[in-house]
Image (cartoon, rainbow, N blue to C red):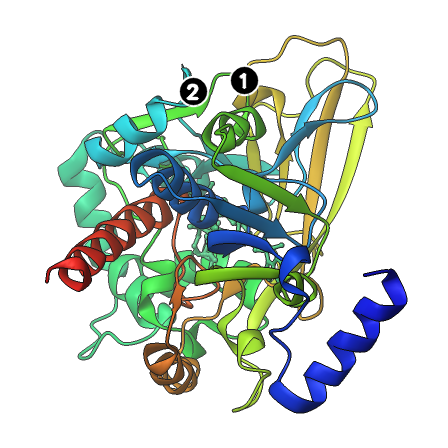
């Protein structure tokens, strides 16, 4: 078969039998095709190859592995996260132990400051935030709790991202820290978003200024990309990067597909587009050793275009004479990053989910395919659980 004959045969077969044909001798054979080399795809590839002995093909339309957690050295040699800051934290020993097979860790507790009226104050709101912002001297948890209680509004039915904050801290703090930031981040007022969104950020009466309180908080010692390389380094795993999965399925034979891209795209937007929020990043390198006092400074003022600035050396511990930072500008257009949690989007997702459930031979997993505002550890947990289900199902099928 030369190229012309192959093209002709494929074309004839497209017309006669659909598109899953290519001359038998030319087709590569895999047990599973995995679409997406982010956390969801990498965990499933590793498990299927390493634990089940499968031959797996992993494809990604991007030219690299790691999905949104991808990190790289920029032109100055500073390790940055191309798609914005990724801080690993989890309460799951299972997830932490699993990832620890592929990386050592650098202990790191995340701290964030918010820029308000030319002051930098701790975010999440804690006792220090209240004292700095209002010139108070609240001495202990009880005094801070009493202060917040005197400001909080009673909300009968806490449904939205506005409700959850005003019920905890009152309108003034809500407007200072949450309203503008959220309107920028999501292009929606907090009153139009599920309460789960702003409920991710707690309020504290202590002076604990850590962003997370999870049991395990650490960064992969040599970065995320190295960790993904270790996960995917297996003779049973073949990588094909910079390709659309639709351009690959014509030339392979597979029993099963794991899809980790946007679910609406898989179904050709049959019910319309499922909204995902995007971001534009502006990466800069500065000729100073340190740009800001912590890894992330948030800008809740709606008049300031960026939501936050990240300085990576705080996260990675890298020593370098220069420093690299990223500005984040939220946008409607661009790569899909965030599912947008609100009731109408969930209803549309459910319609796609029903199609997914009925789709033979395809498993949907990950933040985009299951339309869930998941952190990395939750995606790893979901992928491990999905693998266990796949194994259980195949054991049932193999039972005579
Ligand atoms: P992704 O990483 O999006 O991977 C999906 C992959 O599929 C992509 O690489 C995509 O190119 C590929 N793909 C899609 N469609 C196709 C197709 N048709 N053909 C081929 N390839 C395709 N989580 C935390 O725990 N801590 C944090 O600090 C944190 N910070 C974040 C900051 C930002 C700015 C963002 C956007 C997310 C953050 N997250 C964080 C969440 C984290 O990025 C996700 O939970 C995780 O990366 C999701 O992994 P995934 O495999 O589901 O999806
Ligand atoms: N948020 C806010 N002000 C802040 C930090 C967070 O209003 O200073 C809101 C905003 O809506 C954001 C949500 O809380 O999207 C969740 O914050 P988180 O830091 O968890 O967001 P992520 O890291 O996923 O972007």
Please identify the quadrant where the N terminus is shown: bottom right
Name the residue nearer the viewer: 242 or 326.
242
When asked about the image quadrant of residue 6, the answer is: bottom right
When asked about the image quadrant of residue 130, the answer is: top left
Rendered location of residue 31, percent (x, y): 43, 53
Rendered location of residue 378, percent (x, y): 32, 48
Badge 1 local density, few (<14 within 10 Å), some, or many (20+)? some
Q: Determine the residue positioned at 38% across, 70% down.
A: 361
Q: Which residue is mark 1?
A: 222
Name the residue nearer the viewer: 141 or 2.
2
When asked about the image quadrant of residue 155, the answer is: bottom left
| Above/below status of 63 relative to 33 | above
Q: Determine the residue positioned at 41% across, 71% down.
A: 341
The answer to whether any part of residue 208 appears in the image is no
Q: Residue furthest left?
A: 400
> Callout 1: helix, strand or loop?
loop
Rendered location of residue 157, percent (x, y): 20, 79
Image side of residue 349 versus residue 395, left or right: right
* Mark 2 vs mark 1, CA separation in Å: 8 Å
For residue 103, the mark is 2
Q: Determine the residue positioned at 80% across, 33% down.
A: 284
Please identify the quadrant where the C terminus is shown: bottom left
For residue 105, the mark is none
Name the residue nearer the viewer: 39 or 130.
39
Mark found first going from the N terminus, 2 or 1: 2
Q: Are marks 2 and 1 in contact (CB under 8 Å)?
A: yes
| Above/below status of 324 relative to 348 | above
Image side of residue 272 versus residue 142, left or right: right
> Callout 2: helix, strand or loop?
loop
Badge 2 local density, few (<14 within 10 Å), some, or many (20+)? many
| Above/below status of 308 relative to 100 | below
């Amino acid at each position: 078969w030369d190229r012309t004959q192959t093209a002709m045969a494929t074309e004839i077969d497209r017309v006669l039998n659909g598109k899953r044909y290519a001359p038998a001798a030319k087709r590569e054979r895999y047990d599973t095709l995995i679409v997406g080399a982010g956390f969801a795809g990498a965990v499933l590839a590793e498990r299927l190859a390493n634990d089940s002995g499968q031959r797996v093909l992993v494809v990604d339309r991007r030219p690299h592995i790691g999905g949104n957690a991808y990190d790289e050295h920029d032109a100055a040699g500073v390790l940055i996260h191309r798609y914005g800051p990724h801080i690993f934290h989890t309460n799951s020993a299972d997830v932490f132990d699993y990832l620890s097979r592929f990386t050592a860790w650098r202990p790191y507790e995340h701290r964030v400051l918010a820029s308000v009226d030319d002051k930098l104050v701790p975010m999440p709101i804690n006792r220090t935030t209240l004292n700095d912002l209002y010139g108070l001297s609240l001495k202990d948890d009880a005094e801070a709790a009493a202060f917040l209680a005197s400001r909080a509004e009673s909300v009968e039915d806490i449904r939205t991202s506005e409700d959850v904050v005003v019920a905890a801290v009152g309108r003034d703090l809500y407007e200072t820290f949450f309203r503008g930031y959220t309107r920028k981040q999501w292009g929606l007022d907090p009153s139009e978003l599920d309460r789960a969104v702003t409920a991710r950020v707690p309020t504290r009466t202590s002076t604990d200024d850590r962003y997370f309180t999870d049991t395990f908080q650490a960064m992969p010692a040599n970065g995320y990309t190295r960790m993904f390389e270790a996960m995917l380094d297996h003779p049973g795993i073949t990588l094909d990067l910079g390709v659309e999965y639709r351009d690959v399925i014509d030339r392979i034979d597979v029993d099963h597909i794991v899809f980790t891209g946007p679910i609406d795209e898989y179904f050709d937007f049959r019910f319309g587009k499922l909204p995902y929020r995007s971001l534009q990043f502006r990466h800069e390198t500065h000729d100073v050793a340190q740009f800001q006092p912590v890894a992330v400074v948030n800008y809740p003022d709606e008049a300031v275009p960026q939501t936050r600035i990240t300085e990576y050396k705080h996260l990675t511990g890298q020593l370098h004479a220069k420093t690299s930072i990223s500005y984040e500008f939220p946008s409607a257009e661009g790569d899909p990053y965030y599912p947008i949690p609100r009731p109408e989007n969930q209803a549309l997702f459910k319609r796609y989910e029903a199609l997914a459930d009925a789709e033979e031979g395809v498993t949907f997993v990950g933040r985009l395919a299951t339309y869930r505002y998941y952190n990395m550890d939750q995606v790893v947990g979901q992928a491990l659980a999905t693998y266990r289900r796949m194994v259980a199902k195949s054991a049932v099928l193999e039972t005579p």
